[in-house]
């Protein structure tokens, strides 16, 4: 009976199970990070419900439909990004939101799904590996929304949008030699970006990352305090609700971007390993779904989405533990906050849809 | 490109994708391993380092100021205490705009300009996260008004603190002194600055300064957990501070009050000693000031008014005022004459109202223009004849006068346990050669022997030499503090009187000679202080004196009325009583008082009455 229900709802059980465990773990940490405030948990639960709902809805959408919608969605997305730049609402020093009266909508979030969809759509129609011309067009498909988002400015999302598109390209078997030369080309590009496209605060973040102690009470404070939190957690942690860094307000952004530091402090390395294992299981399942995809569009899209998820996890934990500069990405399904969770869950909805909408093979 | 062609090959695509998925899986694994390595570095290798940092973040060691010891008079009357009072304090680090906060406070309670001025002064040298006081002694209503509005006043706190308070204010200001906020110089000079890490006040003058080390106590510590904004969340461990020692003084505030009242608005100073023990029974300098003004920082206006006043209320005349002792030293010079066998009690000198040296036409005048006639030592003391002492001085010579009076303590610091005592001056040949680069002139010996000229003495010194005389040469260092009580162990420390090198005398009968003459000063028919002997139930030995404020030209009439009050002579009086068993020695000066017998002596009588008589006016046993 239940099996039938799951089949009809197009749910991938291993993925759902992993996500639910992750969400439960996230709520546990959030309860501590948010100073045991129950209202916070309630709000997060509500968001999770919405996010799971979105996942369920997308799981019902046939991948072929997504294939048909991809160019339209991409067009709408670009239009919205332009609209944001022209008439968006300013919040936290950046223009990211479109005020739709009822809700504030962040078009850049949508692009995390639409860009890999569009690249997959474009490449899937053509031979794989793609020709140079196709590759350049595919790169432009990625670059346009990335630059529009970076201009808002929202470096974290731009990074994710770009990487989601790039991953699709990589999955499309672009030759390694090309990838190598592209990486070489990135170095002067990075210098140009540093010089002309970065805001002062973004440069500051990079500089602070290189030497956090240079400004211990200013920009370096986040990193220093989160490293102290993680490091003092040790192997087994200080115990749930016992983190001094978190509870004595030394740790900034502890319920949002820096929530991993709370985990590291209270549950120690063991807790962090449990979390990483959970993420790995989810990613492995995602890759398996991708490999089992029936056509190139499905495979490229699901591969791009799952690797984006990996980037999410790696960049967040990397920045909180001082391995990467602070770019302002939440830890998926753990951090407090709504819009990015909805996107992440939507991508899992697409994965589930790809896994559960199998056409009978023609011989 | 040609190899793959333009046609799609689903099987090859699937195969290629699988390869890339394997690469992706390996890449993902590498990233995860990277993260795990990073975590291992932070949480295992550097764990100890970060644990220390986290502890430092969280745990603060805060010093706790000890409670300052109390000061009592000899009868247990509190002279200095610690009163809980509410003060409004600001943590500058938590205030966004100081100007706005101050004006917001100003709308709720009264904040004077001098409060603000002092606040900014303290603000300049405050330690990080230290509270800087803006207002002291808030009333209950003011506390309530601030409390109600606290949510709008970030960084503003009301704290209950112990504030030093001197219940008797001006009456004890010149003895007990006061504490004030520690300044940078004092902080630098501290022997053990860590003991003062929580202390805000330090003894500035008087007993408060002299006994700072005993009064202060030992600092305590508490380990507290603080949050990122430095707020204390809970106390983890506490080492309580040890309170300072309590001091019990020899001072009797009853006498102190009697003396202060007896001055009746005149300027001057009085010191009363117990001859056998050196105990300071009273030490009064008039006018005085309210020592409480200085505790939390005096404002400029009040300070200016006090410091520029012609009456010099801040000046401790008893300790630092240096006056010519005048005729009060005549008994000592007389004793020197007897001791050096220059004269006997039988010897007499004719007094015509002036004295002249050979080969010198300068007339050394007697205060009594018509002269005292044929006069001996006793009557010369009783009537304060100058001519007799001019002659005696000539015979003794400056060397013998100087060394003899110095032996009593004239021109030397008594060593009293109060800081800032002035030394006075007993001139000598040697002194004049060194300081004036001149030889000693014979005429200077004459005026020195009647206590004029270069000789200077503080009221304390005069009391000390009088006490030494009363104790028949036994010299005891004056002591303000009687005993010290350690509050933690209740242990009582009573320093024994410090005996200084005394005055030896060949024939003790000579003490009685001088005592008898001094008794006649008060009780005799012609005594210069006879007006105080009315209804006196005990015998007083005394000597009046006047100290010239300015010199009078030769042959000039001395008309007191014509001289402005400020230019009048200082009136002096020394005395001890009862004569046969001296229990109190009093010395005093009334600035521009004119006559020692008429102005100064009655004050001494009141003080001695207060000490020696019971409520019914009978001599205490």
Image (spheres, grey):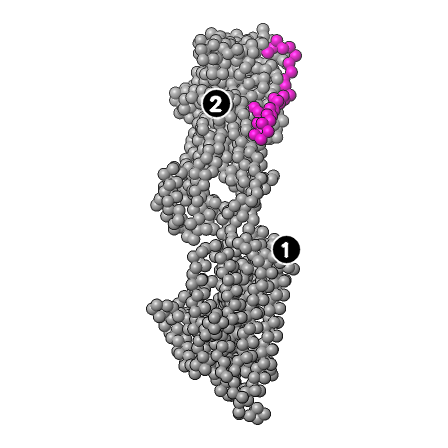
Q: Where is residue A36 in the image (x, y as percent from the top left)?
A: 48, 54
Same chain under badges 1 and 2? The reply is: yes
- Is the Cβ of the residue at disc 1 closer than 8 Å to that at disc 2? no
Q: In which quarter of the image is residue B436?
A: top right
Given the current orientation, which residue lies at the most extreme front position?
A: A1
Q: Position of residue A2 (x, y in %)?
A: 48, 70
- Is residue A249 positioned above or below B590 on the image? below
Instruction: Kindly identify which residue carries mark 1.
Output: B48
Q: Nearer the viewer, residue B80 or A148?
A: A148
First in residue order: circle 1 vs circle 2: 1
Label 1 marks a residue whose chain is B
Is residue B316 inside the magenta stretch?
Answer: no
Number of marks in the rendered image: 2
Q: How far apart are marks 1 and 2 (CA)?
A: 63 Å
Question: Which portion, as a residue range, is magenta?
Answer: B482-511
Label 2 marks a residue whose chain is B
x 50%, y 47%: residue:
B233
Q: Position of residue B262 (x, y in %)?
A: 43, 20
Q: In which quarter of the image is residue B246?
A: top right
Instruction: Kindly identify which residue carries mark 2.
Output: B253
Is residue B510 inside the magenta stretch?
Answer: yes
Main structural element of the magenta stretch: helix, strand or loop?
loop
| Label 1 element class | helix
Q: Nearer the viewer, residue B124 or A45?
A: A45
Q: Which of B475 and B376 is in front in this view?
A: B475
Q: Is residue A120 left or right of residue B46?
A: left
């Amino acid at each position: 009976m239940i099996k039938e229900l799951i089949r009809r709802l197009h749910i991938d059980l291993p993925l759902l199970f992993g996500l639910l465990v992750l969400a439960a773990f996230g709520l546990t940490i959030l309860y501590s990070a948010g100073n045991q405030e129950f209202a916070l948990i309630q709000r997060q639960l509500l968001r999770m419900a919405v996010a799971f709902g979105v996942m369920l809805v997308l799981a019902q959408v046939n991948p072929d439909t997504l294939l048909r919608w991809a160019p339209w969605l991409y067009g709408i997305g670009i239009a919205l990004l332009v609209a944001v730049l022209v008439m968006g609402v300013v919040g936290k020093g950046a223009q990211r939101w479109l005020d739709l009266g009822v809700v504030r909508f962040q078009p850049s979030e949508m692009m995390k799904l639409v860009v890999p969809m569009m690249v997959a759509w474009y490449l899937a129609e053509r031979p794989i590996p793609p020709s140079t011309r196709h590759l350049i067009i595919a790169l432009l498909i990625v670059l346009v929304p990335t630059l529009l988002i970076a201009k808002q400015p929202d470096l974290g999302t731009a990074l994710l949008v770009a990487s989601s598109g790039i991953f699709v390209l990589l999955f499309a078997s672009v030759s390694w030699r090309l990838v190598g030369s592209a990486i070489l080309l990135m170095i002067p590009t990075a210098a140009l970006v540093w010089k002309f496209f970065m805001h002062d605060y973004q440069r500051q973040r990079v500089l602070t990352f290189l030497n956090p102690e240079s400004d211990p009470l200013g920009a370096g404070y986040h990193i220093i305090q989160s490293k102290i939190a993680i490091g003092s957690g040790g192997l087994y942690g200080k115990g749930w609700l016992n983190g001094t860094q978190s509870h004595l307000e030394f740790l900034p952004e502890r319920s949002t971007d820096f929530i991993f530091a709370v985990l590291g402090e209270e549950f120690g390395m063991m807790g962090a390993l449990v979390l990483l294992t959970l993420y790995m299981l989810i990613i492995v399942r995602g890759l398996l779904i991708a490999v089992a995809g029936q056509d190139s569009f499905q495979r490229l899209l699901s591969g791009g989405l799952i690797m984006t998820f990996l980037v999410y996890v790696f960049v967040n934990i990397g920045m909180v533990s001082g391995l990467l500069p602070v770019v302002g990405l939440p830890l998926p399904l753990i951090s407090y906050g709504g819009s990015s969770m909805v996107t992440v869950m939507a991508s899992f909805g697409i994965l589930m849809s790809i896994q559960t909408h199998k056409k009978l093979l023609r011989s | 490109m040609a190899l793959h062609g333009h046609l799609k090959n689903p099987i090859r695509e699937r195969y290629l994708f699988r390869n890339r998925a394997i690469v992706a899986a390996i890449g993902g694994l590498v990233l995860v391993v990277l993260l795990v390595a990073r975590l291992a570095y932070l949480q295992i290798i550097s764990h100890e380092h970060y644990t220390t940092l986290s502890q430092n973040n969280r745990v603060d060691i805060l010093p706790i100021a000890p409670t300052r010891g109390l000061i009592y008079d000899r009868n247990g009357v509190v002279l200095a205490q610690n009163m809980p009072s509410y003060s409004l304090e600001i943590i500058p680090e938590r205030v966004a705009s100081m100007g706005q906060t101050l004006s917001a406070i100003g709308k709720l309670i009264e904040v004077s300009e001098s409060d603000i001025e002092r606040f900014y002064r303290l603000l300049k040298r405050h330690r990080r996260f230290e509270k800087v006081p803006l207002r002291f002694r808030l009333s209950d209503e003011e506390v309530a008004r601030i409390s109600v509005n606290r949510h709008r006043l970030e960084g503003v706190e009301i704290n209950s603190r112990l504030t030093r308070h001197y219940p008797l204010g001006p009456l004890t200001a010149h003895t007990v002194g006061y504490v004030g906020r520690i300044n940078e110089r004092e902080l630098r000079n501290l022997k053990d600055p860590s003991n003062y890490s929580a202390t805000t006040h330090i003894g500035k003058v008087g007993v408060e300064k002299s006994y700072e080390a005993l009064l202060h106590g030992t600092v305590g510590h508490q380990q507290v957990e603080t949050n990122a904004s430095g707020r204390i969340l809970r106390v983890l461990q506490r080492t309580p501070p040890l309170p300072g020692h309590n001091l019990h003084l020899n001072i009797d505030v009853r006498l102190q009050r009697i003396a202060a009242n007896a001055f009746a608005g005149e300027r001057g100073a009085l010191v009363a000693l117990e001859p056998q023990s050196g105990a300071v029974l009273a030490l009064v300098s008039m006018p005085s000031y309210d020592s409480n003004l200085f505790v939390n920082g005096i404002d400029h206006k009040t300070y200016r008014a006090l410091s520029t006043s012609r009456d010099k209320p801040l000046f401790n005349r008893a300790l630092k005022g240096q006056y010519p002792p005048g005729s009060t030293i005549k008994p000592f010079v007389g004793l020197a004459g007897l001791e050096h066998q220059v004269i006997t009690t039988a010897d007499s000198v004719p007094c015509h109202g002036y004295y002249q040296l050979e080969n010198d036409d300068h007339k050394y005048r007697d205060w009594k223009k018509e002269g005292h006639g044929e006069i001996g030592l006793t009557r010369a003391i009783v009537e304060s004849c100058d001519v007799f002492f001019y002659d005696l001085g000539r015979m003794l010579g400056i060397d013998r006068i100087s060394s003899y009076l110095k032996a009593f303590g004239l021109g030397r610091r008594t060593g009293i346990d109060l800081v800032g005592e002035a030394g006075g001056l007993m001139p000598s040949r040697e002194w004049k050669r060194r300081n004036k680069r001149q030889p000693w002139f014979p005429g200077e010996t004459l005026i020195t022997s009647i206590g004029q000229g270069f000789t200077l003495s503080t009221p304390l010194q005069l009391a000390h030499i009088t006490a030494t005389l009363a104790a028949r040469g036994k010299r005891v260092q004056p002591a303000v503090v009687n005993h010290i009580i350690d509050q933690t162990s209740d242990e009582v420390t009573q320093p024994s009187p410090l005996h200084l090198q005394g005055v030896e005398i060949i024939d003790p009968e000579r003490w009685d000679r001088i005592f008898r003459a001094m008794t006649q000063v008060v009780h005799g028919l012609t005594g210069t202080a006879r007006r105080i002997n009315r209804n006196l139930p005990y015998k007083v030995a005394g000597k009046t004196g006047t100290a010239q404020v300015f010199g009078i030209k030769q042959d000039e009439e001395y008309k007191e009325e014509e001289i402005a009050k400020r230019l009048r002579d200082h009136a002096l009086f020394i005395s001890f009583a009862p004569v046969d068993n001296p229990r109190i020695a009093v010395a005093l000066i009334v600035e521009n008082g004119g006559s020692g017998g008429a102005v100064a002596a009655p004050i001494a009588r009141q003080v001695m009455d207060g000490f020696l008589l019971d409520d019914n006016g009978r001599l205490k046993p």
